[in-house]
Structures are given as C-alpha cells and as structure tokens.
Amino acid sequence: MRITVDTNFLVSATQWDYSVAHKLLKRFIEQDVKLFATKEILDEFSDVLQRDFKYSKDEVSNVIEKLLFIVELTEPTKKVDIIKELNFCKFLYKYKYKEECSFVIW
C-alpha cells in the first residue's frame, strides 16, 4: 500500500502520542506501508513546528531527518481533478504522483 500524507497528518502523528494519526503512523510502519510527501508538505510541516510548537531550526531538522527514514519524497506529475467548495477547504487538488498512492491523508 502507498499513502501520501500531508502536513496535518504529520503534525498530529508526531506531536500527540495518542492521536489517531500517531496510531496510524505506528501501524503503517509495522505493516511496511510506503509513505510519501512532497517537499512543499515537509516545508509547511517545518514552518508549523517552528511557529506553533516553538521548535528551533535544529530541532526541526532532527524531526525531518527522522521522518525521511519512513517517508519518501515525491512530486506531483500532473493535476488530475479539482473539487470546489468543500465544507473544510475551498479547493482540494488530487494529483497523480510518480508513485501511485492508494490514499491521500489530510
């Protein structure tokens, strides 16, 4: 199984030990699920850790370094669909990635 994760998932999975995202991340690791994220997602994750959790740049680098042992960087190859006016966000883009993903978690 291949799963693309986003910033919200990464924040929840790494900052709250008893969150659903943390439990999912542990299960993904145990089941050898391939996890993917883009550079932009990791950049946003870094910004959130510094801004909202007061991490230093060294602490963020340490978290990202560890994360890259379990999350592979990928890039969208093309936009395949757009969904407008959802309750929780204005635009949700679904991308086709180099590695086909089974799910996109946000």
Image (cartoon, rainbow, N blue to C red):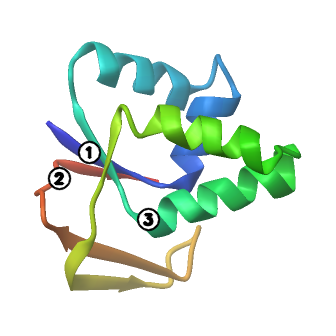
- Disc 2 versus disc 3: distance between alpha carbons? 17 Å
Amino acid marked by disc 3: Lys
> Which residue is labeled 3 in the image?
39
User: Which numbered disc covers residue 102?
Assistant: none
**Image position of 74 with respect to 5: above or below:** below
- Disc 1 versus disc 2: distance between alpha carbons? 5 Å
- Secondary structure at badge 1 equals strand
* Discs 1, 2 touching: Cβ within 8 Å: yes
Q: Residue 12: x percent and y percent?
A: 62, 37
- Check the image and name the residue furthest to the front: 58
**Image position of 9 with respect to 80: above or below:** above
* Discs 1, 3 touching: Cβ within 8 Å: no
Foreground: disc 2 or disc 3: 3
Q: Which residue: 44% across, 65% down?
A: 39
Q: Which residue: 29% across, 13% down?
A: 30
**Image position of 26 with respect to 50: above or below:** above
Tell me if 40 is positioned left or right of 18 in this view.
Answer: left
- Disc 1 versus disc 3: distance between alpha carbons? 15 Å
Q: Residue 82: x percent and y percent?
A: 32, 85
> Which residue is labeled 2 in the image?
101
Compare marks 1 and 2 and give the one earlier in the sequence: 1
> Which residue is labeled 1 in the image?
3
Q: Which residue: 84% across, 52% down?
A: 52
- Quadrant of the frame with the N terminus: top left
Amino acid marked by disc 2: Cys
- In which quarter of the view is residue 99 placed? bottom left
